[in-house]
Image (cartoon, coloured by chain):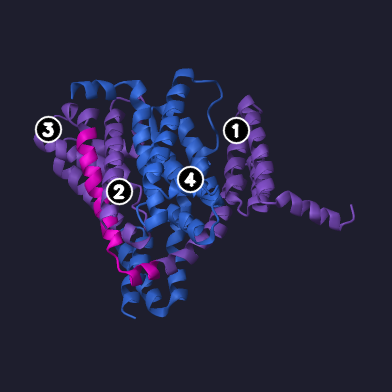
Amino acid sequence: MLTILLKSLVIGALAGAAVSAGAARMFHAPEIQAMGAFRTLGELNACKGDPVAHFSFGLGFYFSSAASVVGCGGVTQDVAHRIIPNWAAGLLLLKNKKVEETLYDPAKMLLVGSVVGAVVYSSLTLLASAVPEKLSTIAAGVLTPAANNMVNLVMPILFWLGALDAGKITGIWGTVLGGLTQLIMGNAVPGLVLGIICGKSIEDNGFTKMVKIMIAVIAVLLIVIGQARGFWAKALGVLAGFGL
Amino acid sequence: MKKLHDLLMKENSFPLLTAMLGAAVFAGGCMFLNDGFGLFNDASQTAMLLVGKTEGEWTTPVGYAAGFLIARVLEGPLVGILDIGGSMQTGVGTGMVALCQSLGLTWITGNFIVSLVAGAIIGLVIGTVIIGVRKAMPEGMSASGTDIMMGVGNAAGRYLGPLTIMSAISYSIPCGIGAIIGSVIMHKLDKPIIGGAILGAMIIGAFF
């Protein structure tokens, strides 16, 4: 319990400091590089200046994050996208209503954000660690088959259809690379992702230098991974079976 | 305070922020592997790591996350805002953790301090690459097709809800009924049904 608390405080403080300072920098982007998300920027702007709005916006997501961490162990992306930046902004705005001196200030956001992050993240992990053994066994028993189906069936199919719908060239690249990674690695998703990026880049810009580099890297990856997983030896074995 | 402000308002301090976030999300992913909770991501990405944990098969999280990481790192410098969801929380916190596991580097993922350092280094590299791309802005750096990928990736999460209800039903009758009730409540509240499905199964399942 204590080690979990200590680990969580460190992780939460680091994450909170980084995303809050990154969020403050969003108000100065694109002059300086920021990090966060466009929707985070929009949502921060929507509650701008009103600490209560920032708090209640974050609170709604805090409850769903708590449910998620108890159920599956993931704290959701909303912790970094929504809860921490909004609560850090809300705390700062309690003292000073001027957003230019609070929400837009990366140094103040970093300091307050680290505290908010530490509290939010460790409260979520402590809550999850307090779940009785029997309940977490049920959660794992329910979620694991669902996760297997999603990873092995739903995701490859969705990516495959996405590639096919994106046009002839993208569909062909996706099918070839997706099929190859299914053969070599046992899952089509990596190949389909690469096939969509490659195919669409070729469709939009032709065979640029970047596409060629990408294809070369993919080829090397497939050869190396196939070697590591013993695929090439197996494939040669099958060919040898034909008496070639 | 003034010094910190000036430092954080500099373009070049960006890698420091990505290093901090990298350390946090990477260590959070490792905490999920070791303790079963703490991953900085949603249910569908958590499910991918769960498959790796139970079956030892890490291909999907690595491939999925690598796609998001590449796309977001190319997009970040162009628009001036790096999307931390795809790049850090999925790319580093889920993908890099899965990559380390698939390569058998458990001395990284199994040790809290080492995982923090490893995450910080990964984050530092990503931040530096982004600042480098911003300074150089080479021609033809735009990666096409990322919009398709993101769309599909985000749609995939929705499938996990119904899959979880079906899985709860085959786990046991009470869990199945709990999952149905939980999903109905969540749907009524305009929340994704996956949370309700798992919690409902857990709560009703606990009594039987």
Report the magenta residues as a range: A110-139
Q: How far separated are the C-alphas under marks 4 and 2?
A: 21 Å
**Residues tagged by mark 3 and mark 2 found on one chain of the structure:** yes
Q: Which chain is purple?
A: A
Tag 3: Cα neighbours inside 10 Å, few (<14), some, or many (≥20)? Answer: some
**Residue at the disc numbered 1:** A201
Mark drawn on residue B112: none
Q: Which chain is blue?
A: B
The amino acid type of the residue labelled 1 equals Ser
Chain at numbered mark 4:
B
Which of label 3 and label 4 is nearer to you?
Answer: 4
Q: Where residue A96 sits: x, y (%)?
A: 11, 32
Q: Is-magenta flag for residue A136?
A: yes
Q: How far separated are the C-alphas under marks 3 and 4?
A: 40 Å
Q: Is residue B126 above or below residue A141?
A: above
The amino acid type of the residue labelled 4 equals Gly
**Residue at the disc numbered 2:** A7
* Residue found 66% across the figure and 51% down from its top: A229
**Residue at the disc numbered 3:** A97
**Residues tagged by mark 1 and mark 3 found on one chain of the structure:** yes
Chain at numbered mark 3:
A
Q: How far separated are the C-alphas under marks 4 and 1?
A: 23 Å
Chain at numbered mark 1:
A
Q: Which residue occupies the foreground of this view, A110 or A88?
A: A110
**Residue at the disc numbered 4:** B95
- The kind of secondary structure element at disc 2 is helix
Which of label 4 and label 2 is nearer to you?
Answer: 2
